[in-house]
Amino acid sequence: MMKFAIPLAFAALFATTASAHAGVISDLGNTGYWGGNDHHYGDVIGGAMYDVKGATVTRAGSKLTVSIDTSFAGHAGSDTWAAAKGIGYGDVFLAANWNPFGTDAHHVNDNAATGTKWTYGLNLDNRWSNTGGTFTLYELNGATNAANVLMSQNFLTCALGTQCYYRDGQATAVNTASKTVRNTGMTGTWTVSADKALLFNINIGGSALAGFGDIALHWGETCQNDVLEGYTDVPEPATPALIGLALAGLALRRKARTSAKA
C-alpha cells in the first residue's frame, strides 16, 4: 500500500488546486450595507426593482467569477426621466481590504470619500445592455477614489432633492478619462441571467488581483439606489510550486520510514 502514498496525495492536491474557492457577501438582514446619503430611505431608494440581495465571488485557478443577485437585473434603461439613457448597471469595484467608515452595522455615513479605497474596477462596455457584453479591468492608482471614479451624480439628470432622490457620493464607474487609472488590457465577459443575476467572468492570471486572499467588493446601479458592499475570503488556490513542495515532503517522509525499517 505504501507505493500508492505519493500518487494518492498528488491526486488529492490536484483536486484541491482545481476546485473553486467561493465566498458570499450578503446585503440582507441587520448587517446589510446601506452606505451614506440614503436621504432617509434606508437600504433601498425607489422601490423593490432596485433591491440588491448579495454577491458570490468564486475563484477557480486564475478564473474570477462575480455573481450579483439583484432585482435590477434586466431593467437597465428604466426611469429615463431621471437620466437620458435611463438607469444602468454600475461597474464592479474590488480591493484587497474593506475599510468602511463607522462601526454601525449599516455604515450609514460611508461613501467614496470616507470609506474603502478601491484598487480595481471592472468597466462595462455598455452598461445599458440587458443581455451583457464585455468589460475591461482597470487599475485605480490615484491616492483617493475621487481621482479614479465617477459618482452617481455624474449619470443623473434630475435635480437631487426636488425632482428625485438617489444615493450620491458612491463609487459608480471607473473614470476612464483619468490619468490615475490604467487599462490592464485584460478583458472579461458579463451576462444578465434569467434568474435576476449579473455574472462577471475574467481570467486574472498575472495581475496583483490574482494574489488577493480577501476580496472587498462594491456595486450598485448608476443611481446607487441600493449598494452592495463588503468582503469575503476567497483564498488563492494551491500552485504547482506548492504541490511540488508537498510531494517532496512526502518523498522524504517515505525515505525516512524506509531507513528506519532497515
Image (cartoon, rainbow, N blue to C red):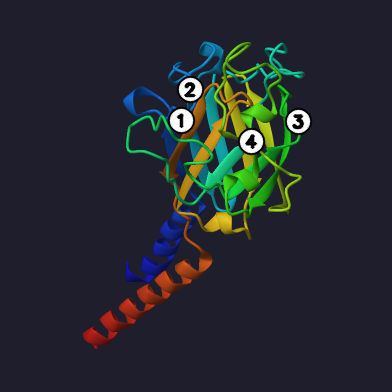
Give the mark, 2 or 4, whose residue is nearer the N terminus: 2
Q: Which residue is mark 3?
A: 126
Q: Nearer the viewer, mark 1 or mark 3?
A: 1
Q: Nearer the viewer, mark 2 or mark 3?
A: 2
Tell me the residue at 35%/80% (across/down): 252
How far apart are the two marked residues, 2 and 4, measured between alpha carbons?
A: 20 Å
How far apart are the two marked residues, 1 and 3, measured between alpha carbons?
A: 26 Å
Amino acid carrying mark 4 in the image: Asp
Give the mark, 1 or 3, whose residue is nearer the N terminus: 1
Numbered disc 2: secondary structure: loop
How far apart are the two marked residues, 1 and 2, measured between alpha carbons?
A: 7 Å
Tell me the residue at 56%/38% (across/down): 66
How far apart are the two marked residues, 3 and 4, measured between alpha carbons?
A: 10 Å
The answer to the question of whether label 1 and label 2 lie on touching residues, with beta carbons closer than 8 A, is yes
Give the mark, 4 or 1, whose residue is nearer the N terminus: 1
Residue toward you, 191 or 172: 172
Q: Is the residue 254 above or below the residue 21 in the image?
A: below
**Mark 3 nearby-residue class (10 Å; few <14, some 14–19, many ≥20):** some
Q: Which residue is mark 2?
A: 38
Q: Which residue is mark 4?
A: 91
How far apart are the two marked residues, 2 and 3, measured between alpha carbons?
A: 27 Å
How far apart are the two marked residues, 4 and 1, measured between alpha carbons?
A: 17 Å
Amino acid carrying mark 2 in the image: Asp
Tell me the residue at 58%/41% (across/down): 93
Q: Position of residue 126 (x, y in %)?
A: 75, 30
Amino acid carrying mark 1 in the image: Gly
Numbered disc 3: secondary structure: loop
Q: Which residue is mark 1?
A: 35
The answer to the question of whether label 2 and label 4 lie on touching residues, with beta carbons closer than 8 A, is no
